[in-house]
Image: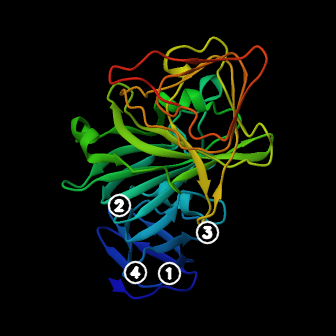
Amino acid sequence: VNVGGLSGSGNLSIQSESRFVVSTSAKQLTIDNLLSSVASGTFAVSGTGTNRTELDFSQNNSGADGIIDLTNIEIDFSDSDNYNKTTLLSSSGLRLTNSLMTVDWDDRNASDSALNALYANNSTITFTGIELASGADSSATEPLLHIGDLSIEDGTKLTLDVSAELTENSNLLQLDNSPYDQALIEYESSDQESDLGSLIQTSDAVQGGTTEYRQGGSIKAYVTWGGGAVSVNQDSNTISASYMLTGIQLFDDKTSGGLVLSAVDEASGQDAVLSAVISDYENSDSSIIAGNVTYAGNMTIGADVNGRATSNSYTGNTIVSGGTLTLAKTDALGHSKDVTVNNGAKIVFAADSASGPYVQ
């Protein structure tokens, strides 16, 4: 059965291998009907408009144990204002075609309430509410989405996107050179397990392109991210995505210290190296904010883990408040209009690189 719309709040019972399809060009569709079906019955919604249709289920469809088939749809994996999560977890399987599903950290499902099956065809899962932090407080090893069986249509990709949140627990130096690996999906089985690494990709950049970074409640900088590789751990059946901090745009030009970049105690190796490109912040109206920056502790401004050393370009003030700051790339201090080295602090100009001297 294929219909162009669905209304009312009555019961839809989809039996045997029956298939009920709602095709709509609407921007938003709420299913108010109560769904019940056997495992082989299919309830499908197909968005026919240029943009995806936003879909919600308003009824507690805990008995909807058939297949949910969504094409050109956006849906939140949440029960906050609806019963989307309940409906999807009750189904025998979710099929996503050219669709987008959003999973928030607060709405993650436990392994004992896994989505029975996921079949993806050219679709994206966006993960939100993740705090990018390191150490004991990190959520990196806990997946947000638990799935029974995972399948991806041959010739297509499943894209994993992360909407990152930075807090004052997030250490930019640690996130800078060591890619942040976030466990996103845990699956029980997949016939494509050996190929999942090539069938899944990360987005080019964390959603939104930039992330606010606050200190003391105030925005100090905007941070840009680059999407990295997908890793599949076949021992733990976990799919993770890596993201690396690629740029810091200085925003605070109101306080003399601006953004404070601190090296953690006894930091060594890449955790003590800042390689992200530091620049001024450009507003949406193309006006420039020349934010200030303070370096605290023993650290190096230099090349990343791949040996790349892109010059900084910021023009705000620089303070070296303590410790030793080693400059190991050209224009490590950008085009700073004023540099202050506090009593007890030190700047060291590193030896020449293999390609020639560093210039500041």
Asked if residue 62 can be seen in this view, the reply is no
Mark 1 residue element: loop
Residue 247 against residue 173 in the figure, above or below? below
* Residue at which label 1 appears: 27
- Crowding at dot 2, Cα within 10 Å, few <14 / some 14-19 / many 20+, comes out as some
- Confirm or deny contact between disc 4 and disc 1 (CB under 8 A): no
Instruction: Compute the Cα span from label 1 to label 2.
Output: 20 Å
Q: Earlier in the sequence, mark 4 or mark 1?
A: 4
* Residue at which label 4 appears: 22
Which residue of the protein is positioned furthest toward the bottom in this rendering?
A: 4
Disc nearest the viewer among 2 and 3: 3
- Nearer to the camera, 354 or 175: 354
Numbered badge on residue 285: 3
Q: Residue at x 44, y 59 (%)?
A: 65
Looking at the picture, which amino acid does disc 4 mark? Val
Residue 196 against residue 2 in the figure, above or below? above
Describe residue 42's horizontal placement relative to residue 176 as left or right: left
* Residue at which label 2 appears: 95
Looking at the picture, which amino acid does disc 3 mark? Asp
- Nearer to the camera, 225 or 354: 354
Instruction: Compute the Cα span from label 4 to label 2.
Output: 15 Å
Disc nearest the viewer among 4 and 1: 1
Percent coordinates x, y for residue 344 in the rendering: 76, 13
> Quadrant where the N terminus lies?
bottom left
Instruction: Compute the Cα span from label 4 to label 1.
Output: 14 Å
- Crowding at dot 4, Cα within 10 Å, few <14 / some 14-19 / many 20+, comes out as some
